[in-house]
Image: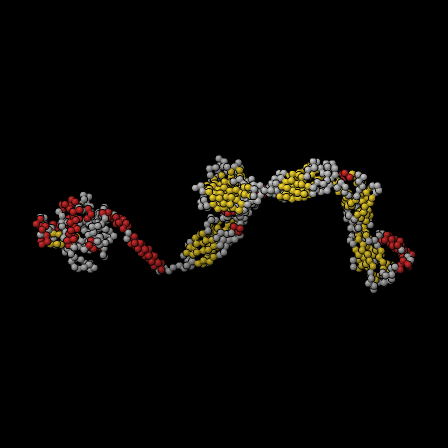
Amino acid sequence: MLEAQLLLEKVGSMPLKCSIWSNFIFLLVLATATPANRAGQDDKICTIHSSKEVLMGSSFQIYCVFKNECNKIIYRDNVPLPYNSSNLTAVMNIVKLTQATTFTCRCKDRPEPCGMDITPGYPPQAPQNLSCVQEGELGKVNCTWKTGLETHIQTTSHLWVQGDPPVNYTSKTASTLFAVPSTQTKLTVRATAINSLGSATSAALTFMLNDIVKPLKPNIVKVKCNSRDCQLYTDKRQNIHLVDIRYKTDQESWNSASFNHANSSTYSNITSLTPYSLYTFQVRWKLGPSRGLWSEWSEAKEMTDEEAPAVMVDAWYFGDSKNTHLLWKELSKSEASGKILGYNVTVVDERKKISSTFIKHPCRNYSVRCSICTVSIFAKNSKGHSPTRRIQLQPIGSLRYTVSHQILNDSSIALSWQRPNNAPEEYLVEWYPVERKEQLQWIRVERHLHTTNITGLQPAKCYDVAVVYLFSSGTRKVVFSGLSTRQSVPQQGPECDATVKNYSVEVKWEDIPLERRGGCLTNYTIYLRDSGDKIKRYSIGKPSEKKFTISDLSPGQQYKLWVTAWTKAGEGPKGRERNIATPPEMMSAEKPMALVVSVGGVVFLACLFFLCICHFSSVHRRFSRCCHCLMPSIVPDPANSKWAKECASEKGEMKLQLYLSDSSMSEEEPDTVEVQELPQEKFKQENIPKDGTYHSVSNLSVQEQELEQEQEQKHHIPSSLYQATTTSSYLKSLSHESGSSDTTQASRGTDMTVDYISSHGVLSGDEDEEEVDDENFFPCPTSPFLSPLMSIGGKLTLDTVKIDCSDFLDFT
């Protein structure tokens, strides 16, 4: 029966063109099978005959033999499959099978099936890349190879080692490990791959053991580092002559170093390293230059030590006359040579006063309260500090040199500038986003260059740029604004406020946020739409202006107002609209009244102001002198009047009665005062200058003033009359006989008739001499603010009298 089954398997794998002969042979086998062999199959309703592994994409037949007649059902992966039936046998034709499939046969009224899993695959290819390595001088030999194309079915490998005797090693993987006698130094090996569809053998590999010996990988015991070098210590238990080391940091590629350790040294020294950096070291070795193979790599990591920074801190400043902001850049990892603990800033002002401050890392700015001073700064770590950078803080002057730029891409711009006749010590290019000076950045350029590239710019953002010339005698710079790599229209409009003032409106607006401007703003436009949908546009050409006044609006109108911003790319969207309204037009009858009220108010305020300032004596005197210029130069002389001539004909004796019309004055006759009259000639000579001007009482002789005081005490004249605040005075006159003798003087009390001319005040003899100097007489009426033009004490004659009627106006 076993021979029959093998025959059936061969038949099942035949192609379809032999199907007739296969059917005949199959029936013949079934007929010759003994009943004893079939007895073991009583527990199954059927048996299935085919090869379990077939060639990928091949066509073949599967036979299902049932024990009894029944309604047959054939399945392919649980899907009914058509078949050909011959008595108790069902034949299925399978075409181009490409994946593993399960075939099942059963009777309709019997649930127990019979079946088989058939897998397509490939025969093996000859193994490739056969190689062998001996692990250590006394270790086993490990041979490896590649099996080639995947077979998809079970495949085994065999390594044939030619020796005495030959050895065959079986492996399910593509490698095998075997021991070699110490007396054997030369070997030949082959690899063979076998599966149910075929087999293949590789080419023979012959080698010497000295050629394939591979040392065990190094054991790195310790790594000891300074700031610039490291020593690698290894456990040297093998007879090693060559050592290969490679090393790198995270940002670098591999660097290599080779050593010949014939002197049995246990460490290797790696130099030219960067301080305070983490290095990865890998080590491998070899028995000799011409012996064996390189070992596997061993790896270790170690940090180099710190050292004092060797590079100066790059610092710069900006500010005004009162406050200066010092900024500096962070040192790179290689420049810092360690962990920066902080920065020391020392300021020496104009008075040589020194102040020092330590600023902890990572802060990189400091405010200096001086406009002209010297600042020193250095960075410090655990090993020391960097060289000191000194900056002379001083006002930076401006230059009118030419600076040109070219946009390279969205993040960089190329700058070039004009060279001066005397080259500076170096150049410095600074830039920052508009209105964000605290984000200042800069780069230094050597003196022999005049071009550089600004990188790290953001598109659609506006920058201010300056080229600074650092001369030994001072600092100058060229400033230009409005630099952008790429511009777009603003993303929003300005928010505005409007204030209506009669028939005009004042518009104010705020800046658009920097991130929504789209670049550098060039101008603003104000739109004003009236109730008739008529729109007026007002353009503001300076982006720095944030206020504009629109006048000549129509009265009683409703308006809508909004503002837009512009860049070189175009106009942005409008901001929020504002509704405004102008007041209605005033009636025609109300306009004159408003004008009268306005003018009257202005006149009243002017008069009130004028009266207030006239209370000051200095203003009073200056105004009086100014008024003299307006008076006529020809003034009547009272000495030539008819009244004066009659007085002269009466020989100095005359009666004068003056009736006061002022109701505020007392009707009683005031007390008379006896006044002594001096000779006329003496008065003219002593009191009247040649230039015709008059002097006050203070210019009289001392004797005359004493005589006047005695007269006042004799007649008990009240002092209040002489201390009045007004400039009025009593004018008193005594009539005597023309002859003036001692007898006449003795009989004055009984024979004289006293007449007087009385004013509303008293003669003030205490006026300052300055008040009447250079004052000319002018007729009444005159200003109530003017002082008396003449004050004469003692004897008074008519030809020296000039009437000043300003006192009459003082009480009106």
Which quadrant is home to the N terminus?
bottom right
The image quarter in which residue 498 lies: bottom left
In this rendering, does residue 612 appear at all? yes
720 left or right of 613 in image: left
In this orientation, which residue lies closer to the viewer: 560 or 463? 463
Which quadrant is home to the C terminus?
bottom left
In this rendering, does residue 441 appear at all? no
Counting from the top left corner in percent of width and height, residue 192 is at 81, 45
Residue visible at 43% across and 53% down in the picture: 549
Q: Is residue 162 placed above or below 791 in the rendered structure?
A: above
Counting from the top left corner in percent of width and height, residue 599 is at 33, 56
The image quarter in which residue 82 lies: bottom right
Q: How is the image coloured?
A: secondary structure
In this orientation, which residue lies closer to the viewer: 266 or 500? 266
Q: Is residue 33 placed above or below 354 in the rendered structure?
A: below
Residue visible at 86% across and 52% down in the picture: 10
In this orientation, which residue lies closer to the viewer: 190 or 809? 190
554 left or right of 436 in image: left
In this orientation, which residue lies closer to the viewer: 283 or 58? 283
Residue visible at 51% across and 53% down in the picture: 493
Counting from the top left corner in percent of width and height, residue 186 is at 80, 39
Counting from the top left corner in percent of width and height, residue 78 is at 78, 59
Q: Residue furthest bottom?
A: 109
